[in-house]
């Protein structure tokens, strides 16, 4: 779909060059990148700052450790396996339960212990890491699907991306897995992106493959019914990630666990621009607005969240 440069400017769309130069380059100190590029570093940092995140069960760092994982897995019925340096959801396996000696993935596929060992070995060798560098394997608790999202996602847990600038949440979207996305929440793979009102957590606009949608493509549930619970708590969690990392421009990926509430999944120092398409307007006016604020007036995450909930409330919803 072609959109003229004039219309993009009118919508306040942030372009890639402007994002890289004016925000990532200016507000993200490169020495801090390892804190978010490595999921294990992020998780340990979150534990230190008491930012809620799925519990880390164990880490596999060396090939010889793989032969011993059976004892560690015996204690777990459901869990997630992640490469510490992966991106785009690659290499993530979600095990929802056991079937005798075998394991059942979220897709319903049955796998064996030997499949898990092979997957861990490939991960350590760098199959899923950026640049193919050697990696580590994280095994963490499974997210319990909150039933508030029943019918809004297919074969996968929905997550919420919040762009945080200088500690202020400036834009949010809910990412819903579909059959086309193979149960993953990546928009370029066919997930539905739902723009969310910063004041209420309600649906503003929704797209799949860049085109407007009004129902989930698989379940047919109306997307305008979406309203994320504990919305202020979720935004406060995202805002605290700024205090935790020191990075001025980040994307915080959060989930809503049925028992534990909002939790941090991972952070991104170079969040993509598709969140603007999901919301139907651009980031630039909000970023310029936040740039003019004096940081000393908004020292806490709660103060920053209260400000954006009032200042960036939507005038219309889907």
Image: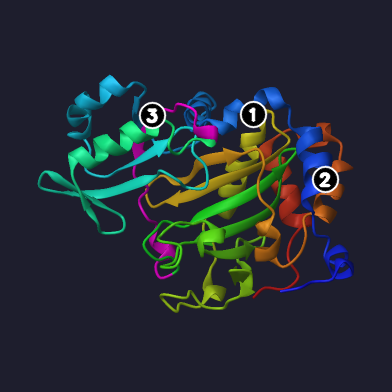
Q: Position of residue 237 (x, y in %)?
A: 58, 41
Considering depth in this image, is 65 or 27 the residue closer to the camera? Answer: 65
**Of the image marks 3 and 1, the number of the one nearer the N terminus:** 1
Considering depth in this image, is 4 or 33 the residue closer to the camera? Answer: 4
User: Above or below — where is 268 with respect to 289?
Assistant: above
User: Above or below — where is 288 with respect to 125?
Assistant: below
Q: Quadrant of the C terminus?
A: bottom right
Say left or right for 223 vs 108.
Answer: right
**83 falls in the magenta region:** no
Q: Quadrant of the N terminus?
A: bottom right
Q: Provide the residue designation for mark 2.
A: 290
Say left or right for 299 vs 178.
Answer: right
Q: Provide the residue designation for mark 1.
A: 33
> Which element is circle 3 on?
helix
Taking the spot 48% from the left edge, 37% from the top edge, the residue there is 52
Taking the spot 74% from the left edge, 51% from the top edge, the residue there is 308
User: Above or below — where is 298 with respect to 102?
Assistant: above
Q: Provide the residue designation for mark 3.
A: 124
> Which element is circle 1 on?
loop
Taking the spot 51% from the left edge, 60% from the top edge, the residue there is 189
Total count of labels = 3
Q: Position of residue 94 (x, y in %)?
A: 33, 48
Q: CA distance from mark 2 to mark 3?
A: 41 Å
Marks 2, 1: nearer the viewer: 1
Considering depth in this image, is 313 or 112 the residue closer to the camera? Answer: 112
Considering depth in this image, is 31 or 90 the residue closer to the camera? Answer: 90
Q: CA distance from mark 3 to mark 1?
A: 21 Å
Residue furthest to the left in view is 100
């Amino acid at each position: 779909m072609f959109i003229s440069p004039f219309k993009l400017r009118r919508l306040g769309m942030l372009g890639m060059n402007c994002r890289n130069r004016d925000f990532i380059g200016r507000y993200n100190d490169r020495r801090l990148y390892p804190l978010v590029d490595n999921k294990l570093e992020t998780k340990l940092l979150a534990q230190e700052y008491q930012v809620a995140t799925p519990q880390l069960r164990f880490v596999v760092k060396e090939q010889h450790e793989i032969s011993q994982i059976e004892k560690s897995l015996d204690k777990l019925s459901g869990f997630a396996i992640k490469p510490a340096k992966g991106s785009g959801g690659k290499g993530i396996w979600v095990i929802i339960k056991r079937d005798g000696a075998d394991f059942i993935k979220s897709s319903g596929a049955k796998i064996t212990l030997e499949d898990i060992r092979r997957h861990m070995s490939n991960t350590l060798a760098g199959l899923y890491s950026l640049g193919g560098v050697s990696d580590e394997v994280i095994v963490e608790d499974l997210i319990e699907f909150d039933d508030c999202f029943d019918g809004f996602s297919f074969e996968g847990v929905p997550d919420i991306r919040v762009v945080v600038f200088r500690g202020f949440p400036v834009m949010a979207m809910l990412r819903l897995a579909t059959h086309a996305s193979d149960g993953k929440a990546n928009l370029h793979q066919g997930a539905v992106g739902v723009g969310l009102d910063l004041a209420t957590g309600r649906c503003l606009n929704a797209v799949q493959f860049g085109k407007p949608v009004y129902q989930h493509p698989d379940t047919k549930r109306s997307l305008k019914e979406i309203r994320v619970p504990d919305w202020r708590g979720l935004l406060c969690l995202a805002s605290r990630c700024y205090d935790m990392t020191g990075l001025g421009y980040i994307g915080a990926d959060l989930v809503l666990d049925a028992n534990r509430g909002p939790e941090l999944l991972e952070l991104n120092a170079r969040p993509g621009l598709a969140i603007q398409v999901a919301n139907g307007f651009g980031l630039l006016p909000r970023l310029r607005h936040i740039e003019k604020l004096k940081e000393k007036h908004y020292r806490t995450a709660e103060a920053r969240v209260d400000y954006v909930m009032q200042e960036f409330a939507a005038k219309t919803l889907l």
